[in-house]
Amino acid sequence: MSDRVLVGTRKGTFVVEKSNGRWSPRLVGHQGVGVNFVARDPNSGTLWAALGHGHWGPKLSKSTDGGETWEDGPTVAFPAGARHLVPPFPGETPEGEEPAAARLEDATVQKLWVMAFGRPGRIYIGTIPGGLFVSDDDGKTFELNRPLWDHESRGGNLFDTEGSGFTHWFGTPASEGGNFAPGIHSILVDPRDPDHLYVAISTAGVLESLDGGETWRSRNKGMLMDYLPDPAAEWGHDPHAIELCKGDPDHLWQQNHCGVFYSSNGGAEWKKVSKPEQGVHFGFPVAADERDGRTAWLVPGKADSQRVTVDGSLFVARTEDGGETWTDLREGLPQDGAYDVVYRHALSNANGRLAFGSTTGNLYLSEDRGDTWQTVSNNLPPVYSVMWA
Amino acid sequence: MARVELTRHLYLYFPQLEGQELVVEAETVADVVRELDALAPGLGGYVCDERGRLRMHVNIFVGDERVADRDRLSDPVAPDSLVYVLQALSGG
């Protein structure tokens, strides 16, 4: 049973632990620094934090003593020659000229967004712009996964060639520095087979690899968008987060910009399971149950155009039947005048204990599968990531 | 030999530089960053991105002049120059 929650916030890393029957947060590192993601490598026990310094750029930090002390991790950098296609911004085409084609730009890491852990020694990092970095030496060095970076859907090999000149990957405003580029925010490793991977990209969709990242294919069948002429186009989807059931990994959950989607066949086909009339549609995070693939939790928000709670009341939605029905879980959560937004990495489940944090700096925790909630803090910095460890 | 002054914030991450007089052999600002990185490995990555470009919210001044070439840091540094590595004020 996990007894500790790692919390990454805009102003540092916190650990939440239970003492004398009460859960409370403690600042353990990176005071004043943006912490996009904190997680524990289950193979080594090392804690990793993905930092976004306001001035000094993206940095990895790690702790081998449970968070008491931290040191800089290795540099995560695009290799020389890594380029990406950047569509022209509005206003860049001079009056009377043909619209400019997407231009090739050297890639630099703008944001370390997510980490995941594979077989012992293997660590993954997802970045903006859209890089998957892989370590096979327990995090001493990281290398760009070329097959995904060179994927045909984003213009092909741009290291050695001019590529196709066209990318199906759009962007997310979530990078630091105001740039607009696609980002990898979800990396899933199949517990049955560490070479079986999924990544989700805002904005492109879900890709799957069956060979440890040597080849990638799209996994967006059944997905629907409401912002492109063809709602079922292969690319252009905006997953906000994906999760799988550890005990039944063919069951995948996706909170998408355009609703909630569920797959019971490993992503071969997705089914929209939103219930907009119940407020279950828009949001960022999703947590899957560890044993029952049909059970998942969301923290819904109101519509992409608003991104606040539904009618000022905060609730968690749970399904136990693959999204056919949803239950509102509200006991212990503020039901009036609450405008919390919960980001994609800020909801976590471990054996029916759930925790989530909001950009309002509130942290809530449930020890009974979400039936009742307690407030851990109302005074944290904006919360970016919450993870049982 | 150019003299270098760093923003206090960088000493937080590179405490080994505390109390040191930072004097480097440099003809350009890029040389200054390289020499600083040799003194405190990793410091170059705080100041510049992986293409060697000055990070958006970092400033370097040579004397009273802000560097002009943020991409290659080719601005010249004289033997008696004083070089400042500072955070750019970026609000927030």
Image: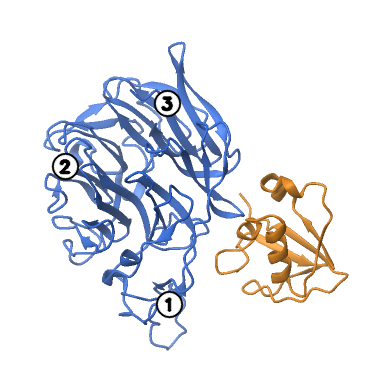
Q: Secondary structure at mark 3?
A: strand
Query: For mark 2, what is the residue?
Result: A251
Q: Residue A84: percent from the left, percent from the top?
A: 40, 71
Mark positioned earlier in the residue sequence (1 or 3): 3
Residue at point 70% right, 50% down? B10
Residue at point 52% right, 29% down? A379
Query: For mark 3, what is the residue?
Result: A4
- Quarter of the image for the N terminus of chain A: give it: top left
> Would you say residue A241 is visible in this rendering?
no
**Chain of the residue where label 3 is placed in the rendered structure:** A
Please name the color used to draw chain A: blue
Q: State yes or no: discs 2 and 1 in contact (Cβ < 8 Å).
A: no
Q: Residue A45: percent from the left, percent from the top?
A: 43, 35
Q: What label does residue A104 carry, if any?
A: 1
Q: Secondary structure at mark 2?
A: loop
Residue at point 13% right, 55% down? A222
Q: Residue A137: percent from the left, percent from the top?
A: 43, 51
**CA–CA distance in space, label 2 to label 1:** 38 Å
Mark positioned earlier in the residue sequence (2 or 1): 1
Please name the color used to draw chain B: orange
Query: Eyeballing the image, is A356 above or below A81?
Result: above
Q: Is residue A149 left or right of residue A52?
A: left
Residue at point 29% right, 54% down? A199
